[in-house]
Each structure stands twice: as structure tokens, then as C-alpha cells.
Amino acid sequence: MAAVDSFYLLYREIARSCNCYMEALALVGAWYTARKSITVICDFYSLVRLHFIPRLGSRADLIKQYGRWAVVSGAADGIGKAYAEELASQGLNIILISGNKEKVQTVAKDIADTYKVETDVIVADFSRGREIYVPIREALKDRDVGILVNDVGVSYPYPQYFAQVSEDKLWDIINVNIAAASLLVHMVLPGMVERKRGAIVTISSGSCCKPTPQLAAFSASKAYLDHFSRALQYEYASKGIFVQSLIPFYVATNVATPGSFLHRCPWLVPSPKVYAHHAVSTLGISKRTTGYWSHSIQFLFAQYMPEWLWVWGANLLHRSLRKQALSCMA
């Protein structure tokens, strides 16, 4: 009995001495919970403010805000084509850049006929490297370029491990995804600074959020574009230039494995036209955004989830996409 009493007294003493630590831990827990709750509320408010509130009012006058001409690279199809059409619907003249001459000329004619704006075409195969930039510079020299949209890019034919990617594809990723955006910005930026207005939109990818296996080189190139855009915004915001990093997740383009289950989820994987309509409405409002409401929700999940969970999900998704792509090719 004495032993039981002694243990009870010891337990009470320990509990009394630990009480202050328990209160401290409770305060830390309450602070952490409050901080996370406020962050989630702010993120939700930002989502509503960015993707829903602007649609209730009138569109911004992009010509007055930035200038009459917009340059769109990768404009023959996908997001680039849809973005060019959306800008043209607001009265901007469009210069379309693509390596596919026949396709980009058809797109330019369709835009001119549909929206009654001026269009021009620059045929350039960015995978050829430095030599193709001299004629582009000459073509843009005397243009009042108000908006530059960097969309040209290449990806893997389907998710692959790095050693399976061809050397030619790796050079294409460097020349097209990284060099093209950097040099096009370098061409148009001095004129924008001189006019003290302009917008640069660089389309990255949701795969840049965290290391993405089976898209290693592609996701790394998109991470470069994201950091490049954010750094430019800090450098040139005071000079009247708005720089936006667009980080879309899957959009129903040829890159997103046609015929895959992703194309059967339009609310999750929008068409290029739907995506571009939403993305253009964020221009001048958010310097870093996914451009589409459901993509913003995916981005929030990606930010808060641990890296191991992102990697596990990416491996699971990419194995499925690779299997579907290989079965279609068989």
C-alpha cells in the first residue's frame, strides 16, 4: 500500500512540474492551428478574388493598358493558339510565331477573319538554336509590342525515366523551353521599358511545383521559366512592366496524352479555349497564378502536401499515362 501511495505522490509531482510545459505546448498548437486557418482563408479569398470576382465586372482595356500588338510564340495550336484568339477578341493585333508554317498561317487567317484585327506570322523553329533569332529580331524591331506570351515548348511524348529520353529531345527542351522565352523577352523588353508599359506572360507548368519524376528535364525547364518570370517581375515592376508566371496543370492539348482519362474530366482538365479565357482575365491582377480555378485548387494541394506524397502521386499518374500511350502506339 505504501508503494502505491508513493507512486501516486510521484505521479502528482511529475504532473505538477509538467503542467507549465503542457500549457506551452497547447499555446504552440493553438498558434499553429490559427496560422494555418488564416492561411487557408486567405488562399480561398485569393481564389475567389482572382477567378470569380473579375468575371462579374467589365474587361480591362488591354490595348490602353499595354499596347496594340501582342506576340504569341507556340501559337499554331494548344494554349498558345487559344490565348492569341482571346487577345484578338479584345481587339489586339497578333504576331504569331511557330515552326509550322502552314498551320500558323491558317490560324492567323482565321483570327484576322473572325476578330477583324491585323495578324502577322513569323516562322521559326526554335529547336535550331541561336541562328533563328536574327530574323525574329528584325521582324519585331519597329513593332509596338505591348504583350509577349511565351508558350512555345516541347515535352516528352509520354512520361519517361530520364535515361530513356533521347539526346535530341533534351536539346529541344533546352533550346525551346528555356532559350526561346529568355531571348524573346530580351528582344521586346527594352521597347517596353522605353514606353513604360507592357506585359510578359510566360507559361510554365504545374509540374514545376515540386520535383516530378518521369518528367525530370521537362519539369526542371518549367521551374526555370517560373523563377525567371518572378525575378523579372521584381526587376521591372517599377518600370511599368507586368510579368506573369502562368502555371497550368493538365489542359486538354496534344501534350496531355490524347484519349487518356484526363480528357474525360473537363472541370479538372479544361480545353485550351476555356483555359485561355480564364487566364487572360488574370492578366494585370496576379503575377503568379495557375490561370484557372480548379488548377488553383490543385496548386494549393500541391503546396501543402509533403514532397513524398507528390512524388508518389506523380509516379502513379505517369505510369498510367505511359501505359496508355504505349498501348495506343502498339
Image (tube, rainbow, N blue to C red):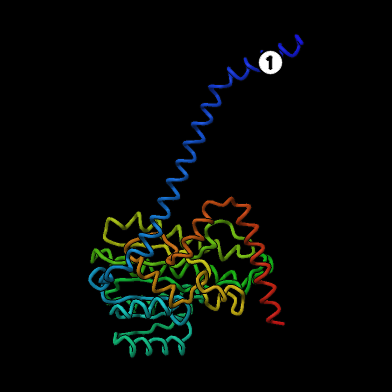
Looking at the rendered structure, the kind of residue marked 1 is: Tyr
Vertical position of residue 213 compared to residue 90: above or below:
above
In the rendered image, residue 9, in percent from the top left (x then y), is placed at: 66, 13
Left or right of 76: which side holds 309?
right
Vertical position of residue 88 compared to residue 52: above or below:
below
Q: Quarter of the image for the C terminus: give it.
A: bottom right
In the rendered image, residue 70, in percent from the top left (x then y), is placed at: 33, 75
Residue situated in front as seen by the camera: 185 or 85: 85
Is residue 268 visible from the viewing direction of this image?
yes
Residue at 67% of width from left, 65% of height from top?
161
The residue at which mark 1 appears reads as 8
Left or right of 42: which side holds 61?
left
Where residue 283 sits, quadrant-wise, is bottom left
Q: Residues within 10 Å of mark 1 (few under 14, many from 20)?
A: few
Residue at 42% of width from left, 78% of height from top?
82
Residue situated in front as seen by the camera: 72 or 26: 26
Question: In the image as oriented, which residue stretches furthest toward the front?
Answer: 1
